[in-house]
Image (cartoon, rainbow, N blue to C red):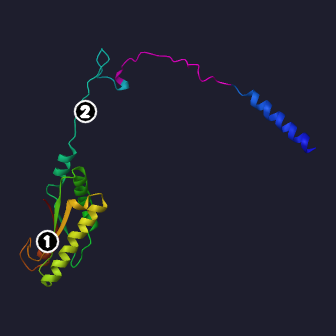
Amino acid sequence: MKLTHYALTLIAAAALAGCGSTVKLDDPAPVETRPVTPTASSGNAGATSSGTSESRVATVDLGTQLNEAVKNQRVIYFDFDSDVVKDEYRGLVDLHAKRLINNRKLALSLEGNTDERGGREYNLALGQRRAEAVAKSLTLLGVQATQVEAVSFGKERPAVQGSTEEAWAKNRRVELKDK
């Protein structure tokens, strides 16, 4: 019984294999060619009668665009006693990263600063941590570590003189300067 079952299965398989159509791969398929006629609706309105068209694509200098985008955006401010880059500055860091990736010859000096509160050594360390936080953000976005240098000035270079919260807020910063 089993032998009969196997024999019928083989016969059915052979019959199905024989029913398939065969296509010769050597035979070329017929190709129909039609002339293209430009129409206004097809987007070829600018084509000339000879069949050629002029390209009016303007070249874009990405380096110049990125330099312009960051020209007046070179300071990242920090909260009191913090070295965390705030979310509001992520776009600025991203722009600088794109600029540095686009031109690997560019380099930045990241100058960390603090307000006047606290001791000299503490503020130098805090300024360094702030500069390194920006450097790490840039390198995580693909900037080479050799393109950024983190330095600290602590409280030695205030942007604004005074002992008010507004003055202190302007002094807690990292300045991104071209080398």
Q: Nearer the viewer, residue 107 or 131?
A: 107
Residue 57 is drawn in which quadrant? top left
Q: CA distance from mark 2 to mark 1?
A: 44 Å
Q: Residues within 10 Å of mark 2 (few under 14, many from 20)?
A: few
- Residue 64 higher or lower than 146, as above or below: above
- At mark 2, the secondary structure is loop
Image location of residue 36, percent across then percent down: 40, 18
Q: Earlier in the sequence, mark 2 or mark 1?
A: 2
The quadrant where residue 119 appears: bottom left
Is residue 131 visible to us here? yes
Q: Residue at x 25, y 69 (%)?
A: 133
In the rendered structure, does residue 35 fall within the stretch colored magenta? Answer: yes
Residue 162 circle label: none
Task: Measuring from the top left, give residue 19's x and y in whole percent.
Answer: 75, 27
* Residue under pointer 1: 170
Task: Tell me the kind of residue under disc 2.
Answer: Val
Q: Residues within 10 Å of mark 1 (few under 14, many from 20)?
A: some
Could you tell me which residue is drawn at 79 percent across and 35 percent down?
13
The magenta stretch is 22-40
**Does the residue at mark 2 contact the one at mark 1 (Cβ under 8 Å)?**
no
Which element is circle 1 on?
A: helix
> Which one is nearer the viewer's eye here, 37 or 20?
20
Q: Given the image, on which type of amino acid does mark 1 rest?
A: Lys
